[in-house]
Image (cartoon, rainbow, N blue to C red):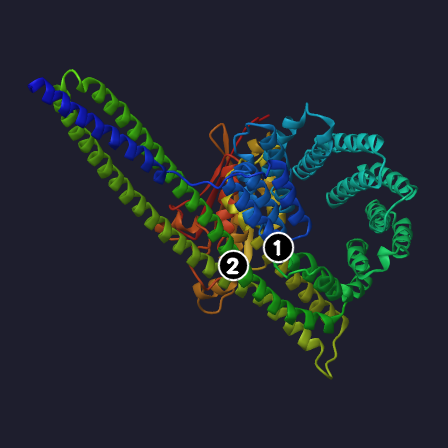
Amino acid sequence: MINKRFVQAGAVLMLTVMMMLSCRESSSPRFKFQQAPKETISYSHADSIIFAAGYAQDYNKVLTLVDSFYNMGVISEINANRWRGVAYNYLGQQRSSEFYYKRVVNAQITNDADRFSYIKSARRLSELLVRRGAYEDALKVSLPALQQLSDTASENRKDKAILLSTIGTCQLYTNQMKQALESYEESYRLYMESVNADNTDRTINDAISCLGNIIKSLLNAEAYDVVEPWITRMDSLEHELRTLEGKNETYINIMNKHRADALLYKAGYLQGTNQPTLASQAYQEYLNTEFGQTAQGKIAANEYLMRANRFSEAAANYSKLNEVIEEQGVEMNLDNIHDYLIPKLKANAKAGRRDSVVVMTLDLCDVLDSAIHKNKSDESAELATIYGTEQKETEIANQKAQIAENEAELSNQRLITLGVVGALLLIFFTIYAIKHRQHEKLLTDANTKLAAANNELEVKNKDLTVAREKAEEASKMKTNFIMQISHEIRTPLNAVCGFSQVITMPGMEFGEEELAEINNGIVENTERITGLVNKMLELSDVANESGIEKNNQVTAKDIADAAVMKSGIDKASHLHFQTYVDHDLIEHTFASNLEQATRALALLLDNAMKFTHPAEAAVKVAGGIDKKEKASLNVQPNGEDKVDFIVSDTGIGVPPEEAEHIFEEFVQLDDYYDGTGIGLTLARSIARRLGGDIVLDTTYSPGARFVFTLPLEGKQ
């Protein structure tokens, strides 16, 4: 009877356990992500649908389609991020575009579809980086992508040619002329292979566009001695395009544009090689082309006219600028102000059009204010989008990890329970006791894990609080910077306005010297505005931590002389300035980057000039005595493997407790002095990327003393 009861009890318990297992099995899907069925949409079909939306220039629809297909599991995360990079690029959100392209470039490639997206993303990312002057970062992206294509089929020939052209431009602007020309030659060879294999207007047009970009880069780098063969090649391909039959209207317009570009490049080359007569003839041919007679063509011609000192013609052409801006829908952001409005102001100033300069200066003030505030708003919106994307992906990853952990725990429980059910028929009471102990252990483990998860959540909340506080502090500092830069821009603008109002005042007469002085004042303040806008655009260099290539053999004296000339401190009227270079360093060369080292040292010399201002000297000297402040540059060895560039002045000095604070972005200890607060930050960033450093000598009391140290690598 007892055994029968045990068997009955065991059967009931086994049935109960089986029901529990069934319930758990059926309820487990609530822990899983519910994915929509793929239905009949294939990867290639989805890609075609997205491409069609992009071809129609509906890039918001592209983003919606990408999210839908990715959530359905039709396209991979890598392909989705590639299309997001494309859409944000055409929407003008460059930061978001780079963000998604970098996610593709840094992802793990597992199949041909991912490799296709990687190549396209690396190509476009390197082009974006080149556009904003980040040539070393562009090389880090494009060179590995080129290796992926080295042994691939001919259908990737165009991607390879574009990558080589981009790499050549990066090498050109990082002083690697020989390597740049080799990359350009290989790119040209691949384009010609495409033309020979498929002699159509499209392939020839691609080759001509590549040659145009190469010629323009060489002209901008003033590499006139190697430009002529490329112009000849472009002429040859342009002639071949004109002889093709069956061209549609679109390619006829493109062909006319290529012809005009070739003549303008030729004029720039001839002017750069001191052949002004031939340059003028080529320019006249350009004006006779259909494109050269358009408003856009006249604006494009100004690059040559400014180089040829034909300022009046350039100023006249700029009267068409508003027409071009409206036609192309150009938005007046900081980049376009730098590319269009400031050259227009400079052309009119150099042409002596004083009335126009007054009007343009007042307009420029309003446009700059709007552009600065819009730039701040756009960057904040992009950062919010990127931050939201990262936060969302982190939450999804955490949820997936938790789901995996729950499913693993459920699987273990099922195995244990099945083992218990199998043993119930033999040792019912023993299994019951074991199961009871196991249940208690599981509860203890679950409580322990829950407590650990709570602790981890508290730590993450604290980290988020700190991150939010840092973001708020960065936003406040950036706001102060924008206010300061606005003031910095208004100062030269007011000067230009003052000069302009004086010379346009009725009844005023001036001699030639006075007019020359006023004209110089207008030009100098216009160039100062240009410098401030450039400083804002190069603010991104402060956060750059990549090493700078040391491709020059220089002496310490080379760097010192170049920095003194660049800063103009030796011509400052309010200073006595001296330079001393240790005799042992005059002849010895070492490996560095002359341009970047000069830039860092020049920023320190600019700092010395600014904080030894004559107004400060007047406060120090009593009795009306005219006394100049002093500044010096001493170059001396630091051991056997380093050299110190020591910049000293007798200005207002820096308190020792602020020795590190002054190197932070936007920091200014005295609001009395003009400035943006990024000069010392940028100088230290460059020094450290060169393997050195910049520190404040807190033992020096007459003013301020900065020590710029560089390693003597490859010393000879």
Query: Which residue position holds label 2?
Result: 376
Q: Quadrant of the C terminus?
A: top right
Q: Earlier in the sequence, mark 1 or mark 2?
A: 2
Place of residue 687 in the rendered image (x, y in percent of width and height, measured from the top left): 51, 40
Q: Amino acid at mark 1?
A: Lys
> Outermost residue toward the left?
2
Q: How busy is the neighbourhood of tag 2: few (under 14 within 10 Å), some, or many (20 plus)?
A: some
Place of residue 523 in the rendered image (x, y in percent of width and height, measured from the top left): 69, 63
The answer to which of 75 and 366 lies nearer the viewer is: 75
Give the residue at x 57% y 67%: 490
Depicted 299 relative to depicted 659: above or below: below
Label annotation for residue 571: 1
Q: Quadrant of the N terminus?
A: top left
Give the residue at x 29% y 30%: 410
The answer to which of 74 and 318 lies nearer the viewer is: 74
Disc 1 element: helix
